[in-house]
Amino acid sequence: MVPIINENDAVSGNQGYTKENVFSDNDALASIVASQMGAEVLLLLTDVDGLYDRPPSEPGAAIIPEYYRDVEDVSFRIGDKSAQGRGGMKAKVDSAMRALDVGVKAVVVASGHNLSVVRDVFSSKSTGTIFMDRPPTPTAAETAVSCASSSAAQAEAARSEARKLQTLTSEERSAVMQAVAQALRDNAAEIMHANALDLAAVKTNKVEAALVQRLKMTEAKIETLAAGIEQLAAMDEPIGKVLGRTELADGLNLTKVTVPIGVLLVVFESRPDSLPQIASLSLRSGNGLLLKGGREAEHSNAALHRIVVDAVHTASGGRVGRGIIGLVTSRNEVTELLQLDSLIDLVIPRGGKGLVHHVKQNTRIPVLSHADGICHLYIDSEADGAKAISIAVDSKTDYPAACNATETILLHEATMDSCAESVLRALRQASVKLKAGPRAIELGLLTAADAADSMAIEYGDLTCLVEVVSDMDAAITHIHEHGSSHTECIVTENPDTAEYFQQRVDAACVFHNASTRFADGFRFGLGAEVGISTGRIHARGPVGVDGLLSTKWVLKSRDGDTAAAFSGAEPTRVFTHKTLPTDA
C-alpha cells in the first residue's frame, strides 16, 4: 500500500490540463502510480462519502455504491468543485476511468474523514463507491476487494486436517516427516530453480545485501533442513506426554497431558528455508498451519509448499489432506486472518520490528514473537584473549543477518591493557565495520568519526558496536537498557563471575564462553525452530515442538464420583491429593 499525500495538487511541468498531458492533479497522479505499480486496487479519498447521483448538497441525493463502466443504466451529475485544488469529483471519476484503462481492477472513492476507511474498504464493508469495468465474478471479487471467506476456509481446513493428523500413530507421523525430508532432497533442483527466480528479481530491484543473504537457498541449506526434519521425526512422541498425575481421592485420578495448540499462523519475511522448518514443527506437534512468506520469496515458497504438502498427502495414504498447511499469498488475506480469533489459536510473526508491531496491533489472537535481535558479547577482565577473539568473530560473522548474531561488544576497561586491540583487529580482518560508543571514543579505542547513531541497533550485516564498561554490573545495566532480551554472552575464565552474569541477565538465552550463534533450535537439539521468543509467557528462546503444545486435564473415576460426595456437613468422600508417578 503506497499513500500519496499532498497539501495541494501536484501538476506536471505546467503543461496544461488535458488528457494528453501526464497529470494535472493528485487523483491523476495516483492513477499513474497505480498503473506503473501494477496495483490491483486504487483508493481515492475525498471529502464526501463517495460518488452521488447528483451534487450531495441537493435534496434526495443518493450515493452510488457500485459503478460499472460497461453498464449503461447508471447516471450521475457532478456539481461545482471545491474552491481549493484542481480536482473535485470529476477528477476522481476521470482518474478512476483512466486507472481501469491501464489494468487496475477496481477503484474505490470514499471519505477521508472516516479514520478506518482503509480497513473498511479492504474488509468488504460497504464503503464509498467502487468503480469496475463490469459486475465481478466471484473470482474477480476476491482479487479486487475481499478474501475473507477464502481466509476462513483455509483456517477451517487447517483445523480439520490437523484433527486427522492427530489420529495417526506416532510411527505414522514420523514416517510422514521422513517423507517430507526426502522430498526436499529429491526436489532440490526445483527448489534451486525457483529460488534463482526470486534472487534475480531482488537483484534487479537493488535490495540490501542482508535481505539477499536471507533469501538465498543452497544445496547445503536444503540438506540441513532435511537433516533437521529427520531429527524431529526421531524425537520422542510429543503428543499425549504425561506431565503429571494426581490421586484426588481413592479411585479418582487426574492426569495432565500435552496436546497440540490447534491452528498456527506464521508470518515470515525473506527466508524461504523457514517454510519447511515451520511446517515440520507443526506436523510433529499435530497442529494445523497457515503460512505467509515475503513477496520477495514467492517462487521459493510456492515450490517448497507444494513439495511439503504433496509429501504429507502421499505418505499418509491420503488420510491427511494438503489443507493441513495453507500458503497465504496476499497481504489482504493476512489482515483477514488476524481477525479470525475463533479459528486461529496462535500467531507467530518472524521478521522485523515493523512486522511484529503491525501484527500485535491488529489481532486479538495471542502472539509469540521477538521484535529485535540486539545481542551482546561482554568480554570480562578475566577473559582468555584467544577465546575472546574466536567467539567475537564467530558471533558477528558466522551469519550476520541472523537475529542471534552479536551486534554489540562490551569490553571491560581492564581489557584495554590486554585483549581489546586484538579483538578489534580480528574483527576488522574479518571485514567487520566497527561503530563506537562514547567511552570507546573517550578512551581512544575508536575515533569520533566511528560514533554510533544509537546504542540499540540491530545492524544485520558486518557492522558491530563497540563500547567500554567499567565492570560487569555496568555491562549488565547496558544490556538491560539497550538489549532486546534475546541472547547475551560473557567471556571469562572466572566461573563465579560467569554464574553471577548468567543469573542476573534477563534474556531468553545467556551463554558463557560460547558464540551467540548457538541460540538456535537446531543447535539446541530441537530439530528446528518456529522462531525465537523474547516474551516471558508460554515459551521463551528458540521455540521447538514443546513451545507448540498446550495441555489437557484428563480425569478418570472408578466409582462414578460426584462433587456433592466431597462437601456438606458429613461428606462421604475425602480428598487425598497424592502425587503419582508419571510413568504409572
Image (cartoon, rainbow, N blue to C red):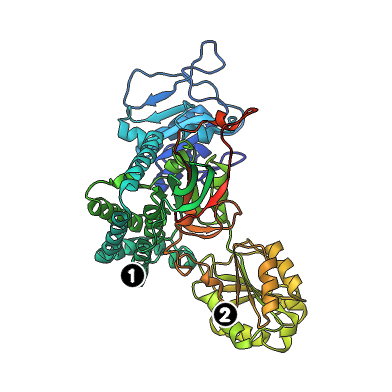
Q: Residue 338: x percent and y percent?
A: 48, 41
Q: Is residue 87 left or right of residue 98?
A: right
Against 412, residue 564 (above or below) is above
Residue drawn at (39%, 36%), measured in percent from left and top?
152
Residue 522 lies in what quarter of the image? bottom left
Helix, strand or loop status at disc 2: helix
**Quadrant assignment for the C terminus:** bottom left
Residue 260 pos. (x, y %): 43, 48
Where on the picture, by quarter, is residue 376? bottom right
CA–CA distance in space, label 2 to label 1: 26 Å
Which residue is denoted by mark 2 in the rendering? 391
Q: How many marks?
A: 2
Q: Quadrant of residue 455?
A: bottom right
* Disc 2 packing (10 Å; few <14; some 14–19; many ≥20): many
Task: State the image coordinates of residue 217 (x, y, percent, origin top left).
Answer: 37, 66
337 left or right of 388 in image: left
Which callout, 2 or 1, points at the residue further toward the start of the chain?
A: 1
Between residue 562 and residue 304, name the one nearer to us.
Answer: 562
Left or right for 194, reference 561: left
User: What residue appears at the point 56 percent right and 83 percent down from the top-left corner?
Assistant: 390
Callout 1: SS? helix
Residue type at the position of mark 2 = Ile
- To which residue does mark 1 refer? 223
Question: Residue 577: percent from the left, percent from the top?
Answer: 58, 45
Amino acid type, label 1: Glu
Front-lying residue, 233 or 129: 233
Side of 446 where 29 appears, left or right: left
| C-beta proximity under 8 Å, tags 2 and 1 | no
Q: Is residue 53 visible?
A: yes
